[in-house]
Amino acid sequence: MNDARLNDDANERGSAQNHGASVGLTADKITIRGGIPLVGRIEVKGAKNLVTKAMVAALLGETPSVLKDVPNISDVRIVRGLLEVHGVKVTEGAEPGDLILDPVDVESAHFAAIDAHAGSSRIPILFCGPLLHRLGEAFIPDLGGCRIGDRPIDFHLEVLRKFGAVVEKQPNGIRMSAPNGLKGAKLELPYPSVGATEQVLLTAVRADGLTELKGAAIEPEIMDLINILQKMGAIITVDTDRVIRIEGVERLLGYNHRALFDRNEAASWAAAALATDGDIFVGGARQPEMITFLNVFRKVGGAFDICDDGIRFYHPGGDLKPVIIETDVHPGFMTDWQQPLVIALTKAHGTSIVHETVYEQRFGFVDALVEMGATIQIHKECLGGHPCRFGQRNFNHSAVITGPTQLHGADIVVPDLRGGFSHLIAALSAEGTSTVSNVGIISRGYENFIGKLRLLGADFDLEG
Ligand code: EPZ
């Protein structure tokens, strides 16, 4: 451990853990000495996949909004930059992790400024509806995001056109205008896309008339965005058949909202506890949004205690057991939960199957695990309970994991956010030393993960 870096981070860590201050990750490579159980308490803040959308929603208000429990992650910093180039004033609130978003002086932004801030985020596409309402135009650069499939935006463009937007593809992005304003529409999604559902919500709340969305996504992050929009003055109903209806209103005001906790981060640390024979208390985690994960965690051999201020995840001893997992939309097993859990499955006594039905190419991370000694085969067939969209389309979207295997240290390069966290877990649970490079990607979605690893007793050095 580099002592100077340790001291700096240690000072930061105290404030970061207690107050959520940022711990910028300057290093991009970590050398990890594995085999140490992770034990201790960490805190999770607001959900990456909610707070970024909540920040965009502030554009719709005529007065400032306050968003609480915002994690200091690069996805938030990217959206903050995009809001600021559009004239939104973003300042820190009274409590650490609080953001004040003042949209009073919203203005068009130059393409170059938008492109400079968009980075690897997919969130810019969600600016369309609010900017079309506020300014009558929007420009969206070509999008980034983790390479876990093609990640098209056809559903987004389709619904925006139905609201009355004019969409023009340009060499470096998409320009939109709404010459006649935006009108409520009858919509149906071919797949319950989270992003496309958010696109509809952020556009319909100020559109003229009623919008009906069939085949909507209803993830907890979507429901929390609906909480926020309702606070602003929106009228939204969610029916039992997952049809969302929105009555457009004339004006919306700013909101004051504490963000839903990050269940993906909570599940990632739970998986780390299981894979390292550890015991991690995740402050801020709540049972209702994690029921499906908790069932699988228990079936694999993990144990958990639900407390008022969080959830304790631990390996109570005994062999880990194989499971068959099929990812799905909520309330199914989230696609973002499978990568970190796969490491524990390499230690399970028997054969597990993960059938990834949400993204067509989300097993790129297993190559490094096989190098570390895991026995994992990837298949094009739908190996699970139900055939999915990818079955006849030549995508390697089912994994067969045979255990138990003992992982050994290796040199790993992080491919994407959740796969990258699974690589950290693999290095932490492996025998010997691993170097994990390109770890900057992990700070896109895991606030101060370095400080948290230190708190939990991991043995590592930062490099680069
Ligand atoms: C959100 O991505 C999350 N990201 C993802 O988390 C999450 O895995 C995903 O929802 C599913 O829960 C954010 O919220 C920023 P989708 P999103 O639209 O909205 C296809 C993480 O690690 N599709 O529900 O992009 C798409 O290709 C990230 O935190 C279209 O075909 O997901 C995919 O196969 C990873 N056309 C499926 O739908 C479209 O226009 C689900 O995508 C849009 C989507």
Image (cartoon, grey):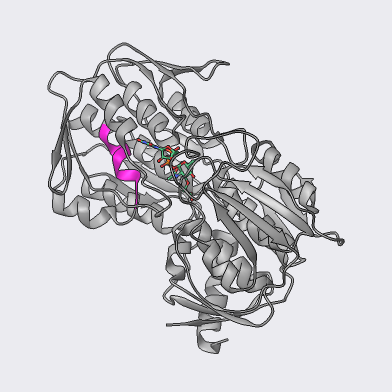
Q: Position of residue 304 (x, y in %)?
A: 79, 50
Q: Is residue 337 above or below residue 279?
A: above
Q: Position of residue 186 (x, y in %)?
A: 35, 14
Q: Is residue 208 above or below residue 129?
A: above
Quarter of the image containing the C terminus?
bottom left
Lateral position of residue 307 relative to residue 257, left or right: right
Q: Main secondary structure of the magenta part?
A: helix
Q: Nearer the viewer, residue 163 or 374?
A: 374
Decide whether residue 125 is among the magenta residues.
yes
Residue drawn at the location 49% of the way across and 29% of the way down:
217
Q: Position of residue 193 (x, y in %)?
A: 44, 33
Residue drawn at the location 49% of the way across and 50% of the way down:
396
Lateral position of residue 67 relative to residue 239, left or right: left
Q: Is residue 15 visible?
A: no
Residue drawn at the location 26% of the way across and 34% of the way down:
128
Q: Is residue 297 visible?
A: yes
- State the extent of the magenta-drawn residues as a range: 121-128
Decide whether residue 463 is among the magenta residues.
no
Residue drawn at the location 40% of the way across and 40% of the way down:
53
